[in-house]
Structure formats: C-alpha cells, structure tokens
Amino acid sequence: MADVETNPPALAVHDLRVGVGPSGRQSVVVDGVSFTVPAGGRLALVGESGSGKSMTAMAIAGLLPGRFRILSGDIKLAGETIDPMARSMTRRRGRDVSVVFQDPMSALNPVMTIGAQLIEAIRVDTAVSRKAARKRAIELLEEVQIARAAERLNAYPHEFSGGMRQRVMIAIALANRPRVLIADEPTTALDVTTQVQILRLIDDLCRLEGAALLLITHDIGLVEGLCDDICVLYGGRVMERGPVASVISQPGHPYSNGLISAIPPLDEDVPWLEPIAGEPAAAAHLGKGPACPFAPRCPMVKQVCHTDRPDLQPIGPYVDAACHFASAQPGHRVNTS
Ligand SMILES: Nc1ncnc2c1ncn2[C@@H]1O[C@H](COP(=O)(O)OP(=O)(O)OP(=O)(O)O)[C@@H](O)[C@H]1O
Ligand SMILES: [Mg+2]
C-alpha cells in the first residue's frame, strides 16, 4: 500500500516538455506532462502509439535518444529534484530509477552470460565482492522464478525463452532495489499467458522490494487490478488522470472513453468492438497549434476545440481531464468534494 502520508512521492513529474530536432526548429513530443507516483504506488501511463509514453519515461531515466532534449519541467525522485541529463544520473540509474524495456533480447548483451550481466548490474553501484554478487545474482534469479538458478547463470540470452529473458531484465532492473521501476511495454513481445505471469511478477517484486511502479502500456485493459492510478496521454499531453477504478468505470474524457470502449470484455461474446475513429496523431506534429490534439478524432468535437487548448482541470474527486466538455460525458461524476 502506498505510504502517501509520511513519504514524499517516489516520483513527481511537473510540466515536463521534451523536444526533438535542432534548437529553434524543435518539435514538442511531450508537452506539459505532470503526474506523481506515491512511494510504493503504481501508476499506469496509457495511450496509443506515438502519444509520448516512452519519451516521458526516457526523459525521467536520462535515456533520451540523441536528438531529444528536455525543454523544461521538474522531475523529483523521493522529493529531490534531479537533472536526468547530468552525469550523476548514471549513478542514480539502477539505484533510484530502473527501466525494463519491451524487447529483452536487444536490452541484453548476446555475448555475455546471464550471470555476468547480473553480477555487473549488482556491482555497478556497490562495493560488493564477486562472491557476494554471485550469491545475490542467484537470489535474484530465484526471485524472478527461474529454476536451477545457479546453473542458469552460465547460460547465454539466446538459450532463454522470451519470457525468461524478460524475467532476467526484471532481475537486473531490481538488482539495486530502485525506488521507482519504469516498465515500458514489458510484455508486448510475449504471448498472452506469459504476459500475465510477467505482470504478476513485476507486481509481486515491486511490493517485495518496496519499489514504486510506472507501467507504460497502450493496453488499458492490463491496468485494472494492477495499478492504483492512471494517466492517459494523447499527442504528448495528459488527457485525463486519476484513480484507475474511477477513470475506467466513468471516463471523463472522450479519448479515455474511446480507449476503454475498445477493451475486449472477458465474459461477453462481443462480435465487434468500437475502435476510436481516425489515426493516432504523432505528438511531434501537435505541439504547435492551440487546439485540443484529439479534436480531429473526437466524437464530441465543437468549434472551440479547434481553437482553444483545454486545460487539465478537476472533473471529480481526484480526477482531472483536459476537455472543454468533460462534464458533458455520460460517465462524468459530479464533484462532491
Ligand atoms: N527519432 C525520432 N525523430 C522524431 N520524432 C520521433 C522520433 N521517435 C519518436 N518520435 C516522435 O515522438 C513521439 C513520441 O514517441 P514515443 O516513442 O514516446 O511514443 P509512445 O507513446 O511510446 O508510442 P509506442 O506505443 O509506439 O511505443 C511520437 O509522436 C513520434 O512521432
Ligand atoms: Mg513507446
């Protein structure tokens, strides 16, 4: 359970803006994103492809690709403002914030054994002897439920299945007990059964290690039961954020509503799901105009949506939405606070 009363948030992101391209001609791909993850809490960052999820995560972890820059914003880890682009971030990575990526094969080194990669991760930050690091590596492999862990240390990544490789990546990410684990589409490359196992594992281990979780996914259906809060991105901007239970049961923003309507129900035989009309807009093309980025696809669009950018504002207890007409949504809850 998140300790919101006594601890500062594990992660607080305020008005983050990320741009790509040469200065003066930059495209904004993350445009004023703000959210917090309480200590030990779990937040899902959700949105279609190109909505700016990964660039938000990469900015926090100081792993932005070469042409991307943080333009402005404030990022706090456990109450302390960090500069993700500073050299000191190398030390923080793994200890304060760790990332699990979508594709474990490209994240692991194919010519190093699993054991060598785990031991390297364990020793990067602490003065641990090789022997103690090897012991911890075995413990970690056991924690991620890899059988015959001691023997498996000598294996190479190609000898492991996709699910096992992702387990190793989780072990590496958690090796130094980070305050925040960022999991960027950690199960997209895996089959459905393995997806569930890996998400359960991430959930269990974050609890065990006391890490806060920032789970990035385009699949809003995965979030229920796993995360406390949700932040819905579109075009690099926050469309809606709030407790998962509230947003999923009563979405206040037409975009969240569209994403939720496209979740296949588990217990009904539905022949056809309602997709959101139109193509997801690339965030990079949206930073310039004053309009709502979702206006071209929105079923509730009015003239004002093409001319005025809606601010993120409270639409109910703990729920904020950026829509001129959020209160007109069928699921909108009256603010009783
Ligand atoms: N190398 C690049 N050069 C220019 N723009 C880029 C580049 N890579 C990504 N972008 C832009 O940055 C925006 C945000 O991309 P990002 O990778 O964060 O999206 P995402 O939400 O993680 O999508 P996905 O679900 O596909 O992973 C996209 O709109 C994309 O157009
Ligand atoms: Mg991504």
Image (spheres, rainbow, N blue to C red):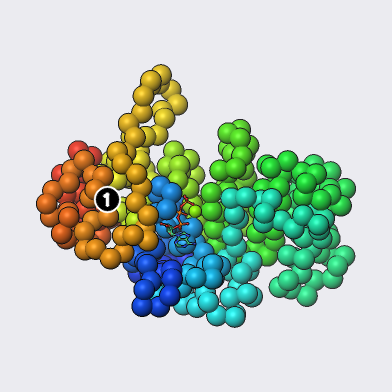
The one of 11 and 208 positioned closer to us in this rendering: 11
Q: Position of residue 24 (x, y in %)?
A: 36, 78
Residue 64 seen in the figure: yes
The residue located at (34%, 44%) in the rendering is 279
Q: Position of residue 98 (x, y in %)?
A: 60, 62
Identify the secondary structure beneath mark 1: loop
Q: Is residue 82 left or right of residue 278?
A: right
**Relative horizontal placement of residue 108, taking residue 272 as reference (left or right):** right
| Residue drawn at x 59%, y 54% as measured from the top left | 101
The residue that appears at 76% across and 69% down in the rendered structure is 123
Residue for badge 1: 294
Relative to 202, say whether 54 is above or below.
below
**Foreground pick, 240 / 17:** 17
What count of labels does the image hold? 1
Q: Amino acid under label 1?
A: Phe
Residue 156: give x, y in percent of width and height. 81, 50
Q: Is residue 28 above or below residue 242?
A: below
Instruction: Judge left or right: residue 319 versus residue 11.
Output: left
Q: Quadrant of residue 191?
A: top right
Q: Nearer the viewer, residue 146 or 187?
A: 187
Q: Residues within 10 Å of mark 1 (few under 14, many from 20)?
A: many
Q: Which of the 4 quarters of the picture holds residue 106?
A: bottom right
Residue at the location (72% across, 44% down)?
Answer: 164
Assign the C terminus to one quadrant of the image: bottom left
The residue sitting at the left extreme is 303
| In-front residue for pair 280/150 | 280
> x, y percentage for residue 48?
40, 47
